[in-house]
Amino acid sequence: MSVIKEYRTASEVVGPLMIVEQVNNVSYNELVEIQLHNGEIRRGQVLEIHEDKAMVQLFEGSSGINLEKSKIRFAGHALELAVSEDMVGRIFNGMGKPIDGGPDLIPEKYLDIDGQAINPVSRDYPDEFIQTGISSIDHLNTLVRGQKLPVFSGSGLPHNELAAQIARQATVLNSDENFAVVFAAMGITFEEAEFFMEELRKTGAIDRSVLFMNLANDPAIERIATPRIALTAAEYLAFEKDMHVLVIMTDMTNYCEALREVSAARREVPGRRGYPGYLYTNLSTLYERAGRLVGKKGSVTQIPILTMPEDDITHPIPDLTGYITEGQIILSHELYNQGYRPPINVLSSLSRLKDKGSGEGKTRGDHAPTMNQLFAAYAQGKKVEELAVVLGESALSDVDKLYVRFTKRFEEEYINQGFYKNRNIEDTLNLGWELLSILPRTELKRIKDDLLDKYLPLVEV
């Protein structure tokens, strides 16, 4: 059992950091409790130790702290989350405390929020389809269990609506296994938090969800703990309760801003755009907690959502996220301004594991061929549209005009399905065939004749 050590030797507070002197047997990442002169308790974590001094990162901020009258207690263990199956259907703040007015949890156990490193040999390969109900993802950028597939958004784009749609609709096909959604919100407004909770309540999806809410007026430093707490809950449900868990984390840009704030307070040498040089390593400690384990029935799938500052995909946050994760879903201002919802740019988006979650026995045998043909036809249609702007429509051939027609219908019917349309994979594939039938059969070169014979006669334009 850990011995709790108490000190009254706090010497300095700088932003979210506190220096405690004359400490003994204190370890990195150790949980710290600060009792203020009025009895209020705040929590922190040991960030750095040098000789007899400890630097403590304060989760609830440093305002109102009287150094002389504060008691600092080192708990002897890292920050832990109380976990139980009763977490499902509950709403917590960014530090894992219930805020929905329900009873306190009776914890089954306490888990370190930093998790345990997963041995690469013990990882199982992700290859099972997750249906989000969104055609642009399910068909063209397929999500599989254990994958980490981020959404790259921009200022003013409806990534919150997309996140809520995925949380409402995501499911595992042809399975009686339990499915849960863990939702981690970082730095969102009160209105956004109300939107997410109301959306999940309306459809009953709240009953299979666990929500962790860090609001914009909460201490920024708390955002560093929120995704780790959410992932700890997800790992518990997945690997100890055999559930398939989808973790949605938004907005990762706010998380990285909190990292930059702590780095600046520590007076560290900044990296690109002022972010700490260890940003890549830090993000990997979150993203690599997705996956499946050999011998375990459950899985953790991640959809981190981030807003690209100034819509710059080369910015350090999307750039480093792209290196660690397995693809990206990119939202488009152009499609959004044309009224298409969700405005997913399918040509720029990519799921690197899409071929692992499709095919006979998972979705349907025509999934991959129609996906490739839709990509090719849409890309050709966009080229023809650009050509028509330069040369005029009179310069287009009859086939070119069919590609223009295909592109228009593809955007209006396939991409623009709306935020409340839950389209199963069968309907999505059938819609794909309906759109492809606009083109002459000779143009469908990426689909074998037996599939053309089987599916083309079934559709009419």
Image: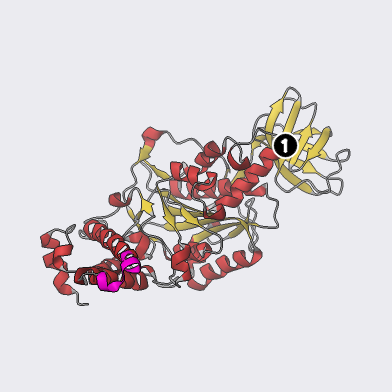
In the picture, measured across the screen, residue 218 lies left or right of residue 135, that is: right
Q: Which residue is mark 1?
A: 56
Report x, y in % for residue 364: 23, 60
In terms of depth relative to the viewer, which is nearer, 56 or 103? 56
Report x, y in % for residue 32: 72, 38
Report x, y in % for residue 392: 31, 71
In the picture, measured across the screen, residue 38 lies left or right of residue 347, that is: right
Report x, y in % for residue 343: 44, 65
Which region of the structure is painted magenta? 387-395
Residue at the (27%, 61%) spot, across then down: 380
Q: With respect to residue 231, does 442 lie above or below?
A: below
Prevailing secondary structure class for the magenta stretch in the rendered image: helix
Amino acid on which the number 1 mark rests in the picture: Val
In the picture, measured across the screen, residue 268 lies left or right of residue 203, that is: right
In terms of depth relative to the viewer, which is nearer, 276 or 193? 276
265 in the magenta segment: no
